[in-house]
Amino acid sequence: IEVRDPYYYDYPDNKMGRRLVGCDVAYVGSLDSDAAKKKAPTFHILTTHLESLSENEKIRANQFNFLVEATKEIDELILACDLSLFSYSEPVNNIILNNRFNDLWRETGMPVDSKDESKDTKDSKDNDRISLFRPYKILYRIKENSKLQRKLRPVSIEEVKGTRVCLIGTFSI
């Protein structure tokens, strides 16, 4: 892969200095010529941390709506984010569902909590509800019939716990 054009957007509704940060990434594979590399399929990798604290639910929704608007022309993207969710009923979850985002956790069939790892997120409404609550997510969106739709596939996700939570997502290209 080749990283191109890093960028960021400051959220307009913002108490904590949060922003959306991203870069354009080209899948150059085994391409040799510069002309071929310029035509290589691209996708975007983004990250964000929405406003914290439970009383900032509306600000988080405004920030995620801004994110949706800022990325509406981007057909292939991976978004690693801390959404600072405090409830499964937060509006951010509906915004995610209504804007063609896939959740890597759900798509790879991961259990939603460590108490019952036999449950996976595709089988139960309770699991769906709990899955929506997870504040840390890796979301992705791939346009139908794009060159990358045939190449970029979700493989796995792992939650590493220590003093902080870290998600490691794997896609195959």
Image (cartoon, rainbow, N blue to C red):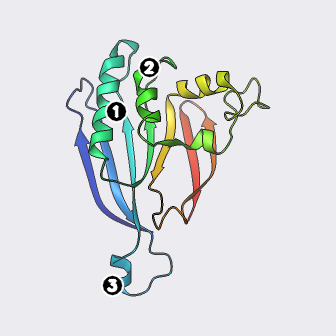
Residue farthest left in this picture = 12
Which residue is at 56% across, 41% downward?
167
Task: Give the amino acid type for the residue marked by disc 3 in the picture.
Answer: Ala
Task: Tell me if label 1 and label 3 are in contact, CB under 8 Å.
Answer: no
Mark 1 or mark 2, which has the lower sequence index? 1
* Secondary structure found at label 1: helix
Q: Position of residue 120 (x, y in %)?
A: 72, 34
Q: Position of residue 97 (x, y in %)?
A: 47, 34
- In the picture, measured across the screen, residue 56 lies left or right of residue 140, that is left
Q: Which residue is mark 1?
A: 64
Mark 3 or mark 2, which has the lower sequence index? 3
Disc 1 versus disc 3: distance between alpha carbons? Answer: 36 Å
User: Which mark is drawn over residue 35?
Assistant: 3
Please rate how many residues cluster around mark 1, counting C-alpha atoms within 10 Å: few if below 14, some from 14 to 19, many from 20: many
Q: Which residue is mark 2?
A: 90
Q: Residue 22 versus residue 67: which sits nearer the camera?
A: 67
Image quarter of residue 132: top right
* Secondary structure found at label 3: helix
Q: Quadrant of the C terminus?
A: bottom right
Please rate how many residues cluster around mark 2, counting C-alpha atoms within 10 Å: few if below 14, some from 14 to 19, many from 20: some
Against 58, residue 135 (above or below) is below
Which residue is at 38% across, 48% downward?
46
Task: Give the amino acid type for the residue marked by disc 1 in the picture.
Answer: Phe
Q: Position of residue 112 (x, y in %)?
A: 66, 29
Disc 1 versus disc 2: distance between alpha carbons? Answer: 11 Å
- In the picture, measured across the screen, residue 109 lies left or right of residue 90, that is right
Q: Residue 10 versus residue 35: which sits nearer the camera?
A: 35
